[in-house]
Image: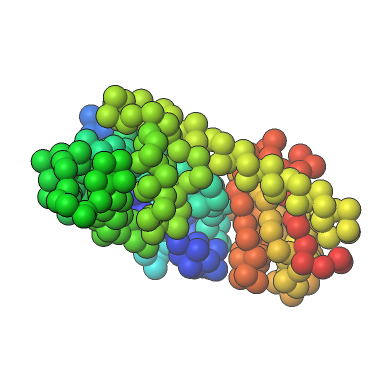
Amino acid sequence: MTLPVDVPTRAEVERLLAARDASCVSIYVPTSPLTQDAQVGRIELKNAVGEAADQLQAVDADRRDVAEIRELLDEYVADDDFWAEQAWTLAVFASPAGARTFRLPNRLDSAVEVGDRYYVKPLLRAITFPQAAFVLALASGGVRLVEITREGPPSPVAVPGLPSDAASAAGKASIADRAPVRRIQGSEGQRVRLRQFARKVDSALRGVLTGLDLPLILAAAAPMDAIFRSVNSYPHLTERGIGGNPEERSDAELAAAARAVLDELYAQEAASLRERFEASAAQGRASTDVATVARLATYGAVDTLLVDIDQKVPGFVDAQTGAVTFADDDAASYGVVDEIARRVLLSSGRVLAVRAPEVPGGGALAAILRYPP
């Protein structure tokens, strides 16, 4: 069974960022895919719903709106089937018009926010860098697909049509079987049969992986590693794999090795972004000033925005000019960086939610511009 996640698409994030209502509630609750631990998240959501209602009442929100939101959210708390399948964080967004939830593969801090728009920035973390991946453990004697996340145990993935081994894929008792006269045999024949096996594995994987963008990490020894890469059709196969015979490793051992691969991918991407920021700054096409970036984002000048996932900057951004007014963190204000992110996304820019050390300049955000201001 795979981890039950529903990471938002870019279009869904944009809809959340664009939503406006006098009473918007955003809740983030750590959860667990382990059924025996589900009750903890359930209780935390119940408490968060009560806290959100208190915050709305404190700013004199319409009583009917508060009652409607509470009823919507209480339905999630009471739904046993809903709690039977969770991931590592539950994100909930509710207004009198309805509610939307996302089960995320990464663990986020608890948060309860109310205002006239949703608090979306933590959600961006789930779509910034891979929080999950697939491991293809491939050997001539067997093949299996395993899903891994940043936390928790790995999950075997059922793949319809997946051949059990190279020999059966070739219709032979062994890939070392001698071939008829004038047919390929010996080591050349074995490579041909391994390639046939790899093609059938790739074909079967399409039914599971098509449309996804999670990394696929190959665990295989030579020559199987090179053979599969030569026939692979999945665009997100990582360059770095896991060496050695995967039949000698447990799923947990493969998961540990795969997380190291993900960490390397993350580090490479973060380093690449920092280098790009520094090069852009040298050309006058970068900024770390919140007010400046807000104005530039309003006019579509931001190409890439890095934001500190943990830092909130409350205030207001003028709809026409992008001028920022900083304010206290209350139900009337909203996250300025969230609003900047919305404007960047709506102008076809890229937004990345990262940890504080990965934001150039050490502030709340850093922007790479399309052209000098």
**Residue 310, image quadrant:** top right
Q: Residue furthest front?
A: 181
**Residue 339, image quadrant:** bottom right
Q: Position of residue 90 (x, y in %)?
A: 39, 45
Which residue lies at the image location 73% right of the left edge and 45% below the top edge?
Answer: 274
In the image, 223 versus 342, the foreground residue is 223
Q: Is residue 122 visible?
A: yes
Q: Is residue 39 visible?
A: no
Q: Position of residue 226 (x, y in %)?
A: 42, 44
Q: Position of residue 343 (x, y in %)?
A: 65, 67
Which residue lies at the image location 24% right of the left edge and 46% below the top edge?
Answer: 185
Left or right of residue 72, residue 372 in this image: right
Q: Position of residue 255 (x, y in %)?
A: 38, 31
Left or right of residue 160, residue 191 in this image: right
In the image, 163 versus 132, the foreground residue is 163
Which residue lies at the image location 16% right of the left edge and 41% below the top edge?
Answer: 177
Q: Quadrant of the C terminus?
A: bottom right
Left or right of residue 294, residue 37 in this image: left
